[in-house]
Amino acid sequence: MSNAPTYSIEPQRFWADPYRDYSQMPPIVYVPELDATLITRHVDIAVNEKKTNVFSSWQPQGLMTVLMGENLMRKDGRDHMTERKAIYPSMSPQVVKSHWCEQFRDYTDVVIAALEGATSGDLFWRYAMPVSAHALRVMTGLTNMSAAEMNRVSQGMIDGCANYVADAAVEAHCHACTASIDAHIDDRLAEGVAEDDLSLLGVQLRAGLTIEQLRANIKLSISGGQNEPRDAIAGTIWALLAHPEQLEKCVAGQVSWLQAFEEYARWISPIGMSPRRVAQTYEYGGVRFEPEDRVFFMFGAANRDSEVFVSPEKFDVTRDIRKSLSFGAGPHFCAGAWASRALIADVALPMFFEKFADVHLDGGVPFGGWAFRGPLALPCRWTAF
């Protein structure tokens, strides 16, 4: 392991609120409970995330690879770029705008209509979850999977990939979720996929990827494409309702819904970290890293770095967030970033606040997670429509 200073965490407390520990950790620190060296400062992550020859995404024994298969985010160099290029026809800004956004709006209309006549409820489950899941169903091509099942298997994989305490039940559940995805892929392949299909299923088939590559990349898209947009939709709604003066800026057009979402993603960081494997001996910041060390780039900590952001603990929709690491940095910048921004900032937020003009929080909003972080509920009340 590295010779970084050691800092111990209490795992459940860290899951509930990692920011207290982030404020006390050295910039580079070994955490024995995670058996990993954490890099927490913005500048150190920005410098080192690009050094894939040292901090490699190829992790054959990593949780994501073992549980979900070797997807494009667990590859470097040419192998990574080959698969990234294969999915680009489905995820490009132009295709998102011209093809997917209309379908996002159609499904969001359906979700909103299902709330007609109600005056209260948990909008995490009744709005954010189905809006995100329906969007992912069409983008992956797994239209044979229900929204509830999409959410279940995504959460199961997220829990599995963050299972650094090696809970056997969490691992078993993750395997059951990936088996469900494989079964749904098999059924869709048996139906046949149209030649002009722009889903991830369709474009990977036309690019000639193997079935193993296709499966792994669809699992990747589900793990990152359901929970993070779901949590960001619910979380940004909560943040704006909890800060009505900032909501008013959005409603009045003084700042965009995209600015609100990007600031929430900086403030809370739905993707809180990215793991790496040390590929060669390396020294940085007085720390010596050894081959096969496990390193976590802590986006959640870096996005609250006071050397980069003024009063980083505050939610401020007018903030300049161009240095935010919410979608990562370097060659592994999130391939689904454009789709996520469009779904949340062009569809989910404006459609919600246009319809729910008189909405208020109706209780506490609990949060959890550090590798992936978001609200666990969003109880609200509103005027019937």
Image: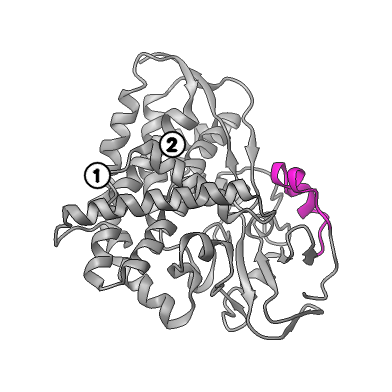
Closest to the observer: 110 or 188?
Answer: 188
Q: Where is residue 313 in the image (x, y as percent from the top left)?
A: 70, 46
Between residues 243 and 43, which one lies in front from this camera angle?
43
> How far across and down, in percent of the image, does residue 4 sit?
82, 72
On screen, 307 above or below 114? below
The answer to which of marks 1 and 2 sits earlier in the sequence is 1
Outermost residue toward the left? Answer: 195
Q: Is residue 24 left or right of residue 275?
A: right
Residue type at mark 2 is Met
Instruction: Residue at 50% x, 43% y: name it.
Output: 232
Q: Element under label 2?
A: helix
Residue under label 2: 129
Q: Can residue 226 be seen in this view?
A: yes
Taking depth in this image into account, of 376 and 42 the one nearest to the observer is 376
User: What is the count of numbered marks?
Assistant: 2
- The picture places residue 273, in percent across and down from the top left corner, at 62, 59
Q: Residue at 57%, 56% (x, y): give it.
A: 161
Query: Which numbered circle lies on residue 102?
Result: 1
Amino acid bearing label 1:
Glu
Query: Distance between the Cα atoms at labels 1 and 2?
Result: 18 Å
Q: Which mark is residue 289?
A: none
Q: Quadrant of residue 52?
A: bottom right
Write the residue at 34% across / 18% down: 116
Looking at the rendering, the stretch of residues picked out in magenta corresponds to 8-26
